[in-house]
Image (cartoon, grey):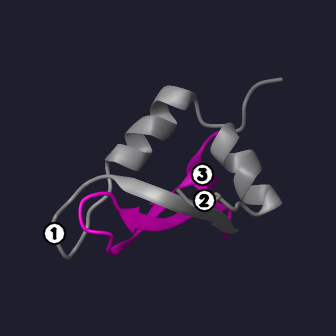
Amino acid sequence: MSKRVFTSQAELLWYSIPANARERILKNVFCTKCKGSEMVDYNGSEKNGDLVLEGSCAKCGHQVVRVVETSEAKPPNN
């Protein structure tokens, strides 16, 4: 397993998502090659306020990408 690399902003976005939701996000990815649905060995970056996860399909190893629209989320009440 490779080391996960996140930009600092992406790491904040990723860990602001509850653990059970993060797990569902990683298990709900579409692979165009084999139609597999789980991401492994992923990295994260931020683009326009959204979290972009790039990794590999757990089934065939093909590159997969998942965009989590964190820019659409309401900020938490403090």
Q: Which residue: 60% across, 44% down? A: 73
Q: Secondary structure at mark 2?
A: strand
Q: CA distance from mark 2 to mark 1?
A: 24 Å
Q: Earlier in the sequence, mark 3 or mark 2?
A: 2
| Pointer 1 local density, CA inside 10 Å: few below 14, some 14–19, many at least 20 | few
Q: Which residue: 58% across, 61% down? A: 2
Instruction: Identify the amino acid type marked 2.
Output: Leu
Which mark's residue is nearer the viewer, 3 or 2? 2
Question: What residue would you read off at disc 3?
Answer: 70
Q: Earlier in the sequence, mark 3 or mark 1?
A: 1
Q: Magenta stretch? A: 47-74
In the orientation shown, which residue stands out farthest toward the left?
Answer: 34
Instruction: Identify the amino acid type marked 3.
Output: Thr
Question: What residue would you read off at disc 2?
Answer: 51
Q: Which residue: 78% across, 58% down? A: 9
Q: CA distance from mark 3 to mark 2?
A: 6 Å
| Pointer 2 local density, CA inside 10 Å: few below 14, some 14–19, many at least 20 | many
In the rendered structure, does residue 58 fall within the stretch colored magenta? yes
Relative to 24, does residue 71 appear above or below in the rendering?
Answer: below
Residue 64, by quadrant, is bottom left
In the rendered structure, does residue 27 fall within the stretch colored magenta? no
Residue 4 vs residue 16, the one in the foreground: 4
Residue 36, by quadrant, is bottom left
Q: Are marks 3 and 2 in contact (CB under 8 Å)?
A: yes
| Pointer 3 local density, CA inside 10 Å: few below 14, some 14–19, many at least 20 | many
Q: Secondary structure at mark 1?
A: loop
Question: What residue would you read off at disc 1?
Answer: 34
